[in-house]
Image: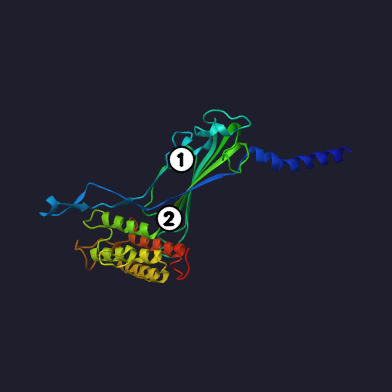
């Protein structure tokens, strides 16, 4: 009889466990953001025009490297904790309170994960980096050479001394344990690829006198293939894609890809001529600009449907 009673008690506890757990820990809340390798930029630096316009022309800097900057707001990550927000107390169960909800950080991790691509797989291999604990988490990440679909995932586990509904009117129940997940996804589009081209045309090839894209006519031709030339009425891959002409966009991107492949250079041009032998697009261990452009094109072809004419993403 004792054995039967004990068995019934164990089964009762086991059946009740999921219900108890649901009250203790809520479902993870995920926030997703897109980030890019290059951003539009403004600068007082201007072109010199000699006698024209008082010697000052248009701006010479139009793009800047993308940066993932994570501002925690303090050692307890208040910027990324729902309970720390001024109106959080309204979701304390069963009786709301004023202001934020007290909380304790249990664990903090940041995981950077990047997939592998067909092109330049040795330059950009698949990789995963995990950082745990606030003092070990890097908060500043330059993105210029990050490949598309790299993700930075910040996960924070925290507890509250009172029952707290961390997603307000959402599906989560009131709980004592909560998980916030913040994901930054590196994206690439035809517009961002054009900005990246601008950036590579601005930045120097090491200590040399030339930019990472040192062939000036090539730079102009690549930009036209991407975003067209409105003055001459020439559409680029972007305009064709927006018009639904994926076959035309695919043809231009294929030409873009071939021209970039042919222009990769492992050493700086021996002479800083604007074009000619030795000029091209830097492709070194420190500056894999050429491979970066190829990987972005591969990603855009896969994600937009341009690589499969007749199909839109």
Mark 2 residue element: loop
Percent of width and height locating residue 24? 64, 37
Q: Residues within 10 Å of mark 2 (few under 14, many from 20)?
A: many
Pointer 1: what residue?
136
Q: Point out the image quarter for the N terminus.
A: top right
Q: Which callout, 2 or 1, points at the residue further toward the start of the chain?
A: 1
Mark 1 residue element: helix
Q: Please, which residue is most extreme toward the left here?
A: 51
Q: Residue at left 46%, top 70%?
A: 310
- Left or right: residue 20 versus residue 128 is right
- Left or right: residue 292 versus residue 114 is left
Taking depth in this image into account, of 28 and 238 the one nearest to the observer is 238
- Left or right: residue 158 versus residue 12 is left
Percent of width and height locating residue 189? 40, 59
Pointer 2: what residue?
187
Q: Residue at left 33%, top 59%?
A: 194
């Amino acid at each position: 009889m004792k054995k039967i009673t004990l068995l019934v008690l164990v089964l009762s506890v086991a059946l009740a466990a999921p219900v108890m757990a649901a009250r203790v820990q809520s479902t993870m809340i995920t926030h997703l953001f897109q980030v890019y390798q290059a951003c539009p930029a403004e600068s007082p630096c201007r072109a010199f025009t000699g006698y024209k316009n008082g010697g000052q022309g248009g701006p010479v800097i139009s793009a800047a490297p993308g940066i993932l900057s994570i501002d925690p707001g303090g050692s307890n990550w208040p910027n990324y904790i729902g309970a720390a927000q001024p109106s959080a107390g309204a979701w304390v169960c069963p009786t709301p309170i004023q202001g934020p909800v007290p909380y304790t950080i249990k664990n903090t991790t940041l995981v950077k994960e990047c997939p592998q691509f067909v092109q330049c797989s040795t330059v950009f291999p698949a990789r995963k980096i995990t950082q745990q604990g606030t003092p070990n988490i890097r908060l500043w990440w330059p993105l210029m050479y990050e490949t598309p679909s790299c993700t930075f995932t910040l996960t924070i586990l925290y507890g509250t001394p009172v029952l707290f509904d961390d997603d307000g009117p959402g599906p989560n129940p009131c709980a004592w344990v909560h998980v916030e997940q913040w994901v930054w996804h590196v994206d690439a589009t035809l517009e961002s690829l054009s900005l990246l081209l601008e950036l590579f045309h601005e930045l120097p090839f090491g200590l040399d006198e030339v930019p990472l894209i040192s062939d000036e006519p090539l730079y102009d031709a690549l930009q036209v293939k991407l975003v067209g030339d409105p003055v001459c009425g020439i559409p680029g891959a972007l305009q064709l894609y927006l018009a639904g002409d994926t076959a035309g966009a695919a043809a231009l991107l294929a030409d873009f890809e071939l021209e970039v492949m042919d222009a990769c250079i492992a050493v700086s041009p021996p002479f800083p001529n604007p074009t000619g032998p030795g000029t091209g697009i830097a492709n070194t261990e420190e500056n894999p600009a050429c491979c970066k452009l190829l990987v972005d094109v591969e990603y855009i072809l896969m994600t937009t449907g341009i690589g499969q004419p007749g199909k839109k993403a």
